[in-house]
Image (tube, grey):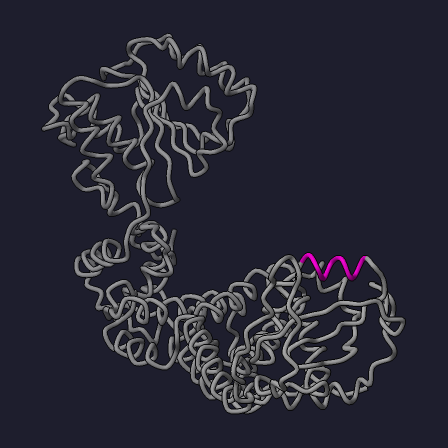
């Protein structure tokens, strides 16, 4: 028409650079090599199932397989792409290769029609090939209708299924297919492919920009190619990292390093200012948090391995990660990453994403450093040593040991009246400590004797007042053990004489009210408590 300008035909990169031979498929050599050998050895299965992420070459490989088995002059299992059959399949006009979308042809009626069609032989090639994409979208009834054909297909039929969700394919279908798992492509493989495309199309693109495109593609070559086309439309034939960050609203790594600066300097106000900047510039908050997870992961990798080979970043940023790792411990990095992971999960379900992000980023910027278990154990051991030294200084000098009374002729010789230096006041002062020690070692025995009292001390003999015969008999049965504990406390050999005394309390009887304030004051003077307050910063509880 007059006044109309014809537009030059444009073909997107994903179609323009679609592989035509098995050798051209990127990153799936474990699949293509097996298929080439099967074709060369004439060991073809009647059904194949290709599974894996989107954009990694499943449908492309299926088309190459369809061409290879029908090619008039195959070369080492690859199609020659020159014969009439190959050209028809490449152009999508072959009657022998039919591509079916499982999402829009998912009913039982469509599969019944397919069952009728498979009876007819191919027009030109050796195999009539059905490629069913997204096969997991078929209904249960459609799968059931397909089973019989899959189990006993005609010799001229080849089925190739492709799916991104293999777990939705019934096991009865899986067992009738040869399965191939396609993997995600690495960033290096995607960058190499894009570099070739850019060079052929006359596009200059920075290496950092290629790396960012590869990371955004997340293992999908088709996604990377689509993003490349978009950037060429935006930026022309010269693409820089700044263009990508600005046009696609991608968070710069410098912002994530500012977050770690805030964490290191414990600056909650700076955290709020940073979120305000992120919101003002229009960044997606959830995408920011996902990037922050990767940022802490990179620091953790640099810290844990001492290298940066596992980090996908430019050399300049790798050096920054090496320096950043020196400022954090592994326990701190694990805590930070767990908190950010929790933030990312919670943002999916909250209507106030900014408020949640502000709270968590303030927590990050206020978090104290973690104490490793080894450091804690070492601190406790040092505290024990100091406490033991103070205890030795405060403990009274041990008294000379006196032999216990010796039993002769069935009777016990009375102790000598010669003073041993142990007074009744001293024994009474240590009696509660003795009862506590017995209770710690044997709670049942300590419960029985807790109401006993010191009636008198003469020489090395200590008379114990008991409430009843049960307490008396219990002491007699355990006398050796009780004497040993008391000797450790007093530093002298003693002998216990038990007797009934009305002033003693029965087991379980309530004691008179305790002066809590006096006990608290005494506790604070204990050497262990003093050491805890002095060395570890412990604080005494408020007294009632």
Instruction: For the C terminus, give its image quadrant.
Output: bottom right
Residue 129 percent across, percent down from the top left: 32, 21
Residue 270 percent across, percent down from the top left: 53, 88
Judge whether residue 246 can be spotted in this image. Answer: no
Exactly how many numbered labels are in the figure? 0
Residue 79 location, quadrant: top left
Q: Is residue 113 above or below residue 248?
A: above
Based on the picture, tell me whether residue 473 belongs to the magenta stretch.
yes
Q: Main secondary structure of the magenta part?
A: helix
The residue lying toward the viewer, choosing from 98 and 358, is 358
Based on the picture, tell me whether residue 86 belongs to the magenta stretch.
no
Q: Is residue 311 left or right of residue 510?
A: left
Name the residue: 32% across, 67% down. Answer: 304
Q: Is residue 363 left or right of residue 29?
A: right
The residue lying toward the viewer, choosing from 207 and 331, is 331
Residue 288 percent across, percent down from the top left: 48, 70
Residue extending furthest toward the right: 502
The residue lying toward the viewer, choosing from 182 and 83, is 182
Name the residue: 29% across, 9% down. Answer: 155
The residue lying toward the viewer, choosing from 138 and 444, is 444
What is the span of residues highlighted in magenta in the rendered image?
470-477
Name the residue: 75% across, 63% down. Answer: 447
Judge whether residue 90 can be spotted in this image. Answer: yes
Residue 194 percent across, percent down from the top left: 24, 57
């Amino acid at each position: 028409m007059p006044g109309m300008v014809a537009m030059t035909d444009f073909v997107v990169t994903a179609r323009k650079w679609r592989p035509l031979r098995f050798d051209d498929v990127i990153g799936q050599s474990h699949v293509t090599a097996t298929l080439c050998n099967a074709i060369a050895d004439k060991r073809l299965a009647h059904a194949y199932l290709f599974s894996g992420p989107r954009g990694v070459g499943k449908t492309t490989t299926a088309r190459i397989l369809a061409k290879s088995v029908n090619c008039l002059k195959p070369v080492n299992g690859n199609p020659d792409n020159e014969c009439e059959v190959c050209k028809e399949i490449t152009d999508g006009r072959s009657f022998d290769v039919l591509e079916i979308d499982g999402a829009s042809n998912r009913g039982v009626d469509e599969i019944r029609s397919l069952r009728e069609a498979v009876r007819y032989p191919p027009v030109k090639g050796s195999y009539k090939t059905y490629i069913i994409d997204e096969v997991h979208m078929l209904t249960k009834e459609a799968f059931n209708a397909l089973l019989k054909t899959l189990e006993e297909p005609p010799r001229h039929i080849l089925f190739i299924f492709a799916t991104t969700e293999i777990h939705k394919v019934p096991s009865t279908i899986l067992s009738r297919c040869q399965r191939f798992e396609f993997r995600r492509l690495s960033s290096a493989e995607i960058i190499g492919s894009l570099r070739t495309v850019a060079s052929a199309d006359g596009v200059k693109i920075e290496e950092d920009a290629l790396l960012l495109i590869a990371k955004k593609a997340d293992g999908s070559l088709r996604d990377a190619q689509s993003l490349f086309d978009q950037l060429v439309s935006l930026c022309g034939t010269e693409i820089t990292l700044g263009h990508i960050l600005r046009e696609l609203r991608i968070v710069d790594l410098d912002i994530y390093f500012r977050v770690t600066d805030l964490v290191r300097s414990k600056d909650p106000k700076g955290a709020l200012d940073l979120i305000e900047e992120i919101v003002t510039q229009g960044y997606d908050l959830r995408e920011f948090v996902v990037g922050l997870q990767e940022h802490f992961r990179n620091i953790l990798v640099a810290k844990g391995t001492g290298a940066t080979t596992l980090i996908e970043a430019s050399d300049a940023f790798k050096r920054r990660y090496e320096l950043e790792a020196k400022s954090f411990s592994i326990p701190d990095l694990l805590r930070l990453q767990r908190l950010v992971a929790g933030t990312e999960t919670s943002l999916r379900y909250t209507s106030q994403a900014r408020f949640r992000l502000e709270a968590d980023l303030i927590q990050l910027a206020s978090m104290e450093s973690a104490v490793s278990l080894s450091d804690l154990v070492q601190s406790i051991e040092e505290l024990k040593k100091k406490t033991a030294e103070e205890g030795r200084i405060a403990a009274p000098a041990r008294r000379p040991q006196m032999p216990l009374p010796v039993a002769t002729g069935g009777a016990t010789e009375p102790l000598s009246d010669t003073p041993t230096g142990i007074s009744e006041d001293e024994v009474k002062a240590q009696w509660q400590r003795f009862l506590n020690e017995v209770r710690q070692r044997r709670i049942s025995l300590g419960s029985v004797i807790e109401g006993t009292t010191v009636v008198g001390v003469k020489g090395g003999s200590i008379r114990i007042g008991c409430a009843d015969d049960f307490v008396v008999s219990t002491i007699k049965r355990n006398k050796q053990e009780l004497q040993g504990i008391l000797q450790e406390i007093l530093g002298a050999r003693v002998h216990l004489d038990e007797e009934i005394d009305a002033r003693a309390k029965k087991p379980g009887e309530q004691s008179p009210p305790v002066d809590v304030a006096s006990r608290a004051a005494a506790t604070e003077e204990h050497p262990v408590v003093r050491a805890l307050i002095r060395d570890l910063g412990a604080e005494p509880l408020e007294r009632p």
